[in-house]
């Protein structure tokens, strides 16, 4: 009989893979590879993903390899910007390309304007321009518009972004610095050298390492790809299977960590696009009904969330006034127990010291339940 993993068991297994049960001693580069990248379309909020996962993390541990090209930010899973190693960018992008193709040709804004464009010519011209030097979207649009005046520059740029592996160049994304969004090609940024490949099977195994146990639909949600059932079926002899409480089949690596469901889970602050919240079709292994009823998906900006006992329990924001940094935590539905308040306050205070080291006053405030 196939073993059943209940919601708490799935929660603890996933938190263990994500280094959210206890902080890991991995380096940033090791963590990025283990996690198959971090979603990183915002300039800096994703640094908090490392802070919550890695022991003694400092911003320089990520900022320096981003600046010296050991890490890159590039459109990958779900057609969103991810922080990955250049090697992973090279091998993941061809596998994810169908997602970007679908995004481009079915895009409500850009699909129709580029429908009659010679895409091969556009790819060649756009890649050559960006290989020569990084360009902002406006700069690239002006240059492409000279060749294709009949098409809106924004659509031309969007097509190049979807069809050519492009990296966002620093200082964009470097902690404590800022800059316009500018791109160059992955090939120009990485330089020439030996190339490698990754099979779809290997990519799915890496997903399970970081996010399992998971259903076929979970893998598809994470990647944006479809029709992965045949991949899982091909891998089945190498996997172990479970059922969840709704009798859905779950797949996992035989030796992957699956802690006891009652393993303590300390408070953890998640950033706005944390992959933990975005990489499963059924997110109830982390997201509670109290969270779901707030309909955060329809709101902007995307909230930053707090896990208590492994599940979403509050949202949080930081406001700054002169030399003061204040974190406001709004619990869902009911106030926290006194014991939880103490551990949350301790974690929040440490986070404020990370985000606002120059503040002379740091305060944690618990707002009314929402």
Image: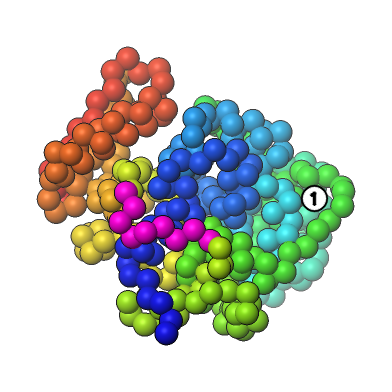
Dominant secondary structure of the residues highlighted in magenta in the image: loop
Q: Residue at x 43, y 81 (%)?
A: 2
Given residues 341 and 81, the one toward you in this image is: 341
- Above or below residue 239? Residue 273 is above
The answer to which image quadrant residue 29 occupies is top right
Question: Does the image show residue 163?
Answer: no
Asked if residue 91 lies left or right of residue 335, the reply is right
Quarter holding the N terminus is bottom left
Please name the colour scheme applied to the rendered image: rainbow
Given residues 198 and 326, the one toward you in this image is: 198
Residue beneath disc 1? 187
Exactly how many numbered labels are in the figure?
1
Residue 81 percent coordinates (x, y): 57, 53
Would residue 368 be counted in the magenta stretch? no
Asked if residue 304 lies left or right of residue 222, the reply is left
Residue 332 percent coordinates (x, y): 19, 52
Q: Which residues are magenta?
A: 256-264
Given residues 362 and 27, the one toward you in this image is: 27
Q: Residue at x 39, y 64 (%)?
A: 10
Q: Residue at x 56, y 53 (%)?
A: 35
Q: Residue at x 80, y 65 (%)?
A: 121
Residue 195 percent coordinates (x, y): 83, 56
- Above or below residue 156? Residue 98 is below
**SS of the residue at dot 1?**
helix
Given residues 180 and 284, the one toward you in this image is: 284
Determine crowd level at label 1: few under 14, some 14-19, many 20+ residues with C-alpha closer than 10 A: some
Residue 179 percent coordinates (x, y): 58, 34
């Amino acid at each position: 009989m196939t073993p059943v993993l209940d919601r708490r068991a799935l929660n603890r297994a996933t938190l263990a893979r994500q280094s959210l049960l206890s902080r890991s001693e991995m380096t940033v580069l090791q963590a990025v590879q283990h996690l198959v990248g971090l979603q990183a379309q915002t300039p800096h909020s994703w640094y908090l993903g490392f802070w919550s996962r890695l022991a003694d993390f400092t911003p320089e541990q990520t900022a320096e390899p981003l600046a010296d090209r050991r890490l890159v930010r590039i459109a990958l899973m779900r057609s969103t910007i991810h922080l990955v190693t250049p090697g992973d960018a090279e091998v993941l992008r061809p596998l994810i390309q169908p997602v970007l193709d679908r995004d481009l040709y079915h895009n409500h804004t850009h699909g129709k304007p580029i429908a009659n464009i010679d895409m091969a010519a556009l790819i060649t011209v756009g890649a050559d321009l960006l290989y020569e030097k990084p360009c902002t979207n406006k700069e690239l649009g002006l240059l492409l518009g000279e060749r294709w005046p009949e098409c809106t520059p924004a659509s031309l740029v969007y097509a190049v972004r979807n069809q050519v592996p492009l990296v966002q160049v620093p200082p964009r994304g470097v902690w404590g610095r800022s800059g316009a969004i500018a791109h160059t090609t992955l090939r120009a940024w990485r330089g020439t050298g030996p190339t490698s490949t990754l099979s779809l099977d290997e990519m799915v195994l890496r997903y399970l390492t970081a996010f399992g146990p998971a259903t076929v639909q979970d893998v598809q949600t994470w990647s944006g790809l479809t029709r992965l059932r045949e991949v899982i079926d091909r891998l089945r002899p190498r996997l172990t299977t479970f059922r969840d409480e709704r009798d859905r089949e779950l797949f996992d690596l035989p030796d992957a960590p699956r802690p006891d469901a009652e393993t303590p889970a300390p408070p953890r602050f998640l950033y706005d696009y944390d992959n933990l919240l975005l990489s499963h079709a059924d997110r109830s292994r982390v997201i509670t009904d109290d969270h779901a009823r707030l309909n955060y998906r329809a709101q902007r900006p995307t909230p930053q969330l707090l896990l208590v006992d492994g599940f979403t329990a509050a949202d949080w924001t930081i406001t700054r006034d002169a030399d003061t940094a204040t974190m406001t935590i709004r619990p869902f539905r009911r106030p926290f127990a006194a014991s939880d308040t103490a551990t949350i306050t301790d974690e929040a205070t440490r986070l404020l010291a990370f985000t606002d080291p120059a503040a002379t006053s740091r305060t944690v405030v618990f707002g009314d339940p929402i």
